[in-house]
Amino acid sequence: MISYPWHQPTYQQLTASFKAGHGHHAQLFKTEAGLGTSLLIQAFANWLLCQDKQGNQPCGQCKSCLLQAAGNHPDFHLLESVEGKDIGIDQIRDTTAKLQQFAQQGGNSVVYIRHAEKLNEASSNALLKSLEEPKPNTYFLLEVPLQTPMMATIQSRCQTWLLQAPYPLQALEWLETEFPQTSFEDLSTALRLSRNRPLICKDWLEKDRLQARKTFLQTFWRFYKSRDLLLLFKAFDSEKEQIFQQLEWLQSFFADALKAQLGIGQDHWLNPDLAKGIIPFSQGLSAQALLKGQNLLQQTASHLAQINAVNSELMLLDCLSKLIFIFEGQDEPR
């Protein structure tokens, strides 16, 4: 079964094309993060392996379905990066060697390559041979981030699916079933801040990041009024990933302030629930200052991604001191 409603149209098209005899032996799924695309691919793999398909659903009862549910189907092959390393040529060769044998369950064989962007040149070329000369009843399912370029020769031999964030209304309907006690306004704000990616939004709400964001940005407001550098510095998390998120929150605050100056309505803001702080903030700074502040925050996040944890504190302090100069309308120190 498909777990998420935004995957249903793609799943229906996939299974329909195979039932009509037009299924392609290699499928490339280019996807945004936070959509749960791996579950879509797994569901399609289950359908391909099922020996007693019920329309566009696996039966769930045949030997293949039971083996797949137990996680030990001999004709399902998962290739993925280990500890962020490349998917090596030996992994490809080992899998293609297994594919030379007949499927042990007498049906289809499925190779799921998760994080296919981790294929290096050697492993890509090894895979290419299998894609150019596909073995009957063998199917390759590749998953890559939406913006990641794939080797042209591989992509040209695949049917490509672009999986993007669903429409906000569909995502909100799903979130309302997951969080029936959360207000529609909070769900809408969390979804906007997670760029309409429902599973990232779900994680946010489960970890109460919406309230953490509000508390952090309230501290930023006090920093803006007091110019107390250490006040905001102490509010930053110790984990690098959370620091990136906090910098994103600050960027969204500056962006909303600029929208307020331009007369753009709050329904287009990321933080409409913080209008009481954003409006006076926008009135106290010029558009040029808001743009400079936003650019500074973006540069800081970019630089933080390239340095070690020891220097991250110094970089944050430098960023906050430069923000103070921007607030006071002065040139940044050289």
Image (tube, rainbow, N blue to C red):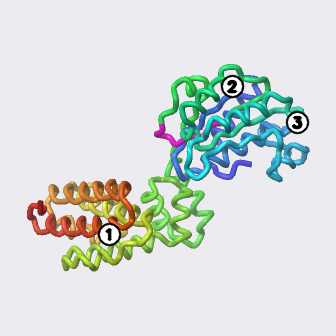
Q: Position of residue 181 (x, y in %)?
A: 57, 73
Q: Is residue 265 above or below residue 153?
A: below
Tell me the quarter of the picture where residue 28 sits: top right
**Separation (CA) of disc 2 from disc 3:** 19 Å
Image quadrant in which you'd find residue 220? bottom left
Q: Is residue 98 above or below residue 256?
A: above
- Residue at position x 60%, y 46% in the image: 81
Q: Amino acid at mark 2?
A: Ser
Secondary element at tag 1: helix
Foreground residue among 116 and 38? 116
Q: Is residue 271 left or right of residue 197?
A: left
Q: Residue at x 28, y 79 (%)?
A: 231
Residue 71 locus on image (x, y percent)? 80, 51
Residue 326 in the image, given as x and y percentages of width and height? 15, 64
Nearer to us of marks 1 and 3 is 1
Decide which of 49, 76 is in the foreground and name it.
76
What residue appears at the point 38 percent right and 61 percent down from the top-left corner? Answer: 308
What numbered label is drawn on residue 313? 1
- Region in magenta: 142-148
In the rendered image, which residue does mark 2 sit on? Answer: 130
| Residue type at tag 1 | Glu
Per the model, the C-alpha gap separating discs 1 and 3 is: 56 Å
Q: Which mark is residue 104?
A: 3
From the viewer's side, name the closer residue of 93 and 266: 93
Identified by mark 3, the residue type is Gln
- Circle 1 Cα neighbour tier, 10 Å, few/some/many (<14 / 14–19 / ≥20): some
What residue is at 63 percent from the left and 38 percent from the top?
10
